[in-house]
Structures are given as C-alpha cells and as structure tokens.
Image: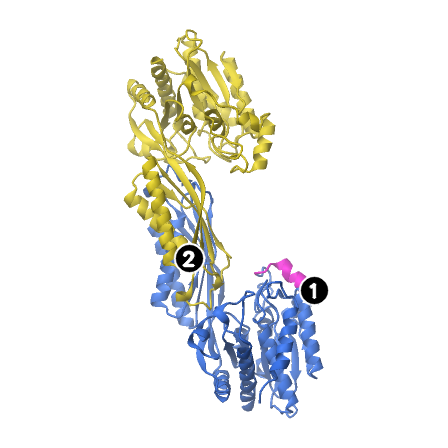
Chain colours: A blue, B yellow
Amino acid sequence: MLINSSRLLSDFNALAQIGSTSDGGVNRPALSEAHLEARRWWLARAAEAGLETRTDSAGNCSAILRSPTRPNGRTLLIGSHTDSVPNGGQYDGALGVLAALEVARTIKEAHLALPVHLEVIDFTDEEGTLVGLLGSGAMAGNLTADGLRAPRGGRAELEAGLVRAGLTEAGLLTAQRDSQTLAGYLELHIEQGPRLTQGAFAIGVVTGIVGITSYRLTYTGQANHAGTTPMESRADASLGAATLILTAREMVIRDYPGCVVNVGQMAFAPGAFNIIPGEARLSLEFRALDPKQLAELDAALIGLATVIGRQYRLKLEVEPVGEYPPAPMGQRAQSAIVSAATSLALSYTFLPSGAGHDAQSLAPLTDAGMIFIPSRDGISHSPLEFSEWEECVNGANVLLRAVLKMAEGN
Amino acid sequence: MLINSSRLLSDFNALAQIGSTSDGGVNRPALSEAHLEARRWWLARAAEAGLETRTDSAGNCSAILRSPTRPNGRTLLIGSHTDSVPNGGQYDGALGVLAALEVARTIKEAHLALPVHLEVIDFTDEEGTLVGLLGSGAMAGNLTADGLRAPRGGRAELEAGLVRAGLTEAGLLTAQRDSQTLAGYLELHIEQGPRLTQGAFAIGVVTGIVGITSYRLTYTGQANHAGTTPMESRADASLGAATLILTAREMVIRDYPGCVVNVGQMAFAPGAFNIIPGEARLSLEFRALDPKQLAELDAALIGLATVIGRQYRLKLEVEPVGEYPPAPMGQRAQSAIVSAATSLALSYTFLPSGAGHDAQSLAPLTDAGMIFIPSRDGISHSPLEFSEWEECVNGANVLLRAVLKMAEGN
C-alpha cells in the first residue's frame, strides 16, 4: 500500500502558492491572512476527500477519518503545521500536513477499517511568530493566561491574530484534549540538519526532541576613553563576552557531545568606536536530549560565565529567558516507524531532533513519534529549504505504514 | 607671576552653568544653543577684560592681546574648546579656554609687553558631535567639501548647526591661517587618563598626540538553525569576532606597549537566540604615537583578522573608516612647559596623549604643546569628570609661564 504521490505533489505545489514569495519561499506567519487562506484551502481539500473537518478553540484544523468499527475508539493524530517563519521555505510544516492528509485519503480509498479514528491536524503557530507550539500546547493544556501576557511575538500581534482568526484567549486556554482519548501522534518533517544527507539515510527515526534553555547575560565593566585608558587598566565587558563565546563552544564540544550552544545576539554599550565597552549583552541558548545532561550543561555554562566575569573584573547578570524540557519520543511510535521504513526497504537511522516541534507538546500525553527526511545542506527557515520529491514521497509512505502499524495495537 | 585663581574659579563656575545637567555635567554639543550661549558669554568676558574679540569664518572665537611693541609680530595661540560631548563634564575643553583667557588678562594687567600677539582661542567642534576638530582643522586648511559631505554627526545636523551659528560651508573652507604668522600653540587640558594620578605628577608634558586608525570589519559565515546544526559543521561568525577581540588585545599588550586597541561596537546578524550568527560586524580602532609603529600595528591587526577568518571559514570584509596621523608636539613648546613647571616647583612627567585634541591640527603648522593636569580616575566625557581646583590652578600657572617662555624667542 502506497500513497498517491502525484496527488500529494499537486497539493504541495498548490499550498506553496499561498503566501509565496518571489524567491521561491513562503511567508505565512501564524494567523496572518496568508496562513488563514492556506487553512481554508486545506480544509476544503479535506472536505473534497470526504473527510470530516473540525476547527478547535485554539484554531487547530482537523480532517477526521472515523473508525467504522470502533465509534468509541481512540484517536491517532497525524500532522504538522501550515504556518511558516517570516520568509520561510515550502517544506517546513507544510509537507507534514499534506502527507498526513494524503495518508488519510489513501486509507479511506482503500476502505481500510482502522480500529482508531485517524485525525489529520494542522497545529496553530508552531513556529512561534506569536507564541510557539501554541496549538499543540493548547491541546496539551500547557497554556496559562500568565504565559500569554507577553508572548515572544508581542501581545498586540497575538491579539490581532486571534481576532483575524475568530479566536479568543479563553478558547486557547480551554482547548485541552483528554490524553485517554489519544492513540498516538506521528509527524513527518524535514530534518533541518545535515545528518541524514551526510549518512545517506532516507529516513530519520527521531528518538526525542532536545530540551532548550536560554538566558540573557549581561557583563558590566566600566565604559571609558579608548585612547587614554591603558590596556591593563580596563574593565572591558567585551572580553567577558568574547571569552564566553569561545570557551562555551570548546566545553560543549569536549564535554557534552551531541549538545549544542549558541550565542546569537550580542550588543556592546555605549557602542562607539572610541569608547571601551562598559556593557556586553548576549543571548545564550543550549540544548540537550537528556534532562540530566541539560541540567549539568546549564550549571556548567553559568559557572563558566561567572568565572569569566571574575577573571576580567566584570559584574555578571543572568536572566533566565525560557526553558523547554527534553521530550523523548514513544517506543511504540519509534518501532512503528522502523517497521514502516524496513517494509519499504528504506535506509534509516535514529537521531534526536535539535529543533522544537509540536510532537514535544504531545509526547507527555501519548505515544509520539517523528519521521525525518533529508533536507539539502540542512537548510531550513529559508526559501532555500529543499528536499528531493522522492524523499518526500518516501516519508509519506513511511507515515502511512507507521499509521497502520500504530493502529494495530488498538 | 601667577594667575588670579579666584577670578578663574568664578569664570569656571559661570561657564559650567551654561548647558548644565542635573547630574553636575554639561551638555554643550558643538553649535547647539547652549554652546552658542557659552561662546557669547565668553566673548563678553573677554571684552570686559579689554581684549579685542574676533570670530572667524569657521566660528572659532578669539580674544586677542596685541603686542604693543611688534604690530607685525607673530601670533601665539592659546586655548581649547567650549563644546562638550553630549552629557559631558565641566572640565574637558572649558578649563583650557578659561585658563587661557585668564593668562591673557594676567599679562595685560601686568602691562607686560610681549613680542608676540597673544590670541586666546575657542575652537569650533573639537569633540566631533558634528565633524571633529572642525575649527582647528579649518584653520589648518584640513577641510574639504568632500570630507564634509557625510560627517560623523550627520550632514543635516552639520547644516543646522551652521545655520544656528550664522556660518556657511564656504566659510569653513576658507578659514585657513598662514602658518608664517603663528608663533606657536599651547593648550591646557585634563589628562583623561590615570597616569598622572598614578605617578603623583602635577603636570604632564605631552610628547605627542597618538595617531588613530579605524576600520569596520565584517565576518560572514552561514546563518543556520542553532538546534539542528552540529557544533563542528558551523560557520559561526561570532567565533571570528570573539577571537579577534581577545587576540588583538594580547598582541597589543605583548608587542606594542603603549599602544591601545578597542572593539567598541559589535552586532550579530540575523540576531536571534536560535540562529547561529551568519554575520558579525565590529569596529576596530587602534592608536600609536609613532607613525611607523601605527603602520606596523595596522598591518599586524588586519593580518590577524584575516588569519582568524580563515581559521573559522569566514569571509572578512575590511572597510577603512578613518585615519588620523600621529602629531608630535614641538620641542620648543615641550621645553617651555618643562621650564614653567620647574619654575613653579611642580612635579612633571612626559606622556603621550591618547585622545585627540585641536593641538594635532596645529602641530604641522607651528610649535604646538599641551599641558595635562590629573583627572580623577581618568574619567572624562562624563559628568563624573573631576580635577582638584588646585591642580587646575597649577595648570593655568604653567600655561602662563610657558607663554612667557615661548614668547621670549620671538
């Protein structure tokens, strides 16, 4: 049993037109006009296929294939998201949603009677232009009014998006689903990294989604005249920031293999050619798959930042910005993906996801799994995002067969 | 012979009120209303003292004590500037202008017949909120229409300032003075550094003003996902910038004693927590007293930046931003200051000026000298700028006696 690859391609090209940019990317930030248009188009495609459609109070859009034999059966969720980062690519999210729809159509056409309801879902705001994992977080009951007060995309933008979509904050806070009703969650996604391409694997079986901890650090020394202050008398905040960048990287490579660290933002103040930086503000973000390792890395990096501050006579302020715990993928889901890839004679490897995904919201509730396919040069969140169409079809077929395998146990 | 310290103090306090800020500083950017008010007040004080006043086509304000014996004699210039950086201190520039006025008054009251005209001068825009060394540069013939097209303070701000002051660009370009008419230039200024305080010296005899070279450097790598891109696969522009900050400092301390280097500006792009910096833009500024050493330091730092780029697989762009050559002070001027300090039993030391001053415009034209007095903690360009009043009076008396010494040879 295989999906209809030309129908999937036709859908893929149609969706890529909605919010398309001149450089071959798409611009569909969550709850923008383009994103809402994409969702209307997608629901219409699902209805055409004879699937039941539904939009919940968090805006999550679903296309449901009811189990003919088990009206009170559990629901197997499959999907991803149709929103994109600003000026993103055609694959991230869109492929997973369309492949899942194609899987449901294929099963429906084959008149296969699954022992579970199959619900294809397009989650709201995975990318975080508003909140991040908003729809899947709402479904998991992770949202609070407090957490929505100052979202990363700005409160005004969130409110405007909700109004455009006909949603309310109260609706976001009451979209939780009972985990007892769920039979699992499967998501197909591009890898967004180089490992599959480098290893020439067709399929990645995701073992878990890394946890992410982030801080804003500020080193404070003494701004001073860059001409008259001898090198030895300076309390130059740039020295702390520069040393942290280099030693944090060395430490992670040496002591925390598989983990990553990033300093993506940096600003010196006052910020003049001829003034010694009295202040250096930087972002620090690091990721680990194992919760214990993430905690150790946290302590090691903050300890390192503190020692460096003392070394250069700088004050260090540490402001926690965010913390996502690691989300291990379910064993049954991983086995179903391995079995599916094997049945299709596709090479596969196990790997963690370094990026966040809706699956991490679902993982604490149900058996969640992710299927990765190669992405060229590991590029994502860019118009240059690209996967060979054959690789996309491979992923969709693995999703189909993993669904059948997951459904079996119910 | 000594200056009248209480009259000088009264002038100092009066001028500090013009453009005063609530934290004890002054805000008199060049050609601002406060600066123009300060200049009107100063010219009135000069006129009250019976000195001839003059404003040239670059806005430089002068108070002149004509030689009674040598109507065709040369002119000995003494002075500094009344403009300040935004939210600067009370001493930088103001002390030098007021002490020079006091010196002229003292000589006039003593009915001393100098063989030179003594011209006290308040130069326009020393600080560079508009152009930098604007008035002294105009007098030295350093300005060009091209150089005024995009001044560091902005073209619109320059034009607005000229209008407020009743000046024109044509006037700036024609304010040059014939060097044959000049007998020398002496300037009293706070050190803006810690050396005099640390060595417990009353007076600094400036040997020269360091040359300054500045660049804007851009390292370009590859912006990428900070979660999915392995540490080893990155082309992280922050690594080049951080390494340059640390190794440039080490190199200057080790190989170029007395020289300084500063990275005062830094920005990473795209500039997100979760994106590896694809670009790091930074300012690089360095100073040396000796022209040969400045050129060597230039080559060494740009070479270092290039090697670092290769090490981390980053492209390096080097954009020259500015170059001020070193300005050695005149031997006669230095001797006159030493002789003056010695006659007053004041301890002194020779030292270079790490900061720019109007004296560097004058040095190629005439025998230029600078007298430094201690500044507390080396702080300047700040409301915290402070020198003990006794130290200011010492400096004014050294200026007086150095003037008498310089005049002798004419």
- For residue A268, the mark is none
Residue A153 within the magenta-colored segment of the rendering = yes
- At label 1, which amino acid type do we have? Arg
**Crowd band around label 2 with a 10 angstrom C-alpha radius: few (<14), some (14–19), many (20+):** many
Q: Where does the C terminus of chain B fall, quadrant-wise?
A: top left
The magenta stretch spans which residues? A152-164
B123 horizontally vs B167: left or right: left
**Tag 1 residue:** A164
Compared to residue A300, the image places residue A227 above or below, namely above
On the image, the x and y values in percent for residue A397 come to 55, 84
Residue name at image x 40 percent, y 29 percent: B360
- At label 2, which amino acid type do we have? Leu
**How far, Cα to Cα, is label 2 from label 1?**
43 Å
- Viewer-side residue, B250 vs B218: B218
On the image, the x and y values in percent for residue B293 come to 32, 38
Magenta segment, prevailing SS (helix, strand or loop):
helix
**Tag 2 residue:** B314
Q: Where does the N terminus of chain B fall, quadrant-wise?
A: top left
B300 horizontally vs B154: left or right: left
Give the chain of mark 2. Answer: B
On the image, the x and y values in percent for residue B276 come to 46, 61
SS for callout 2: loop
Residue A223 within the magenta-colored segment of the rendering = no
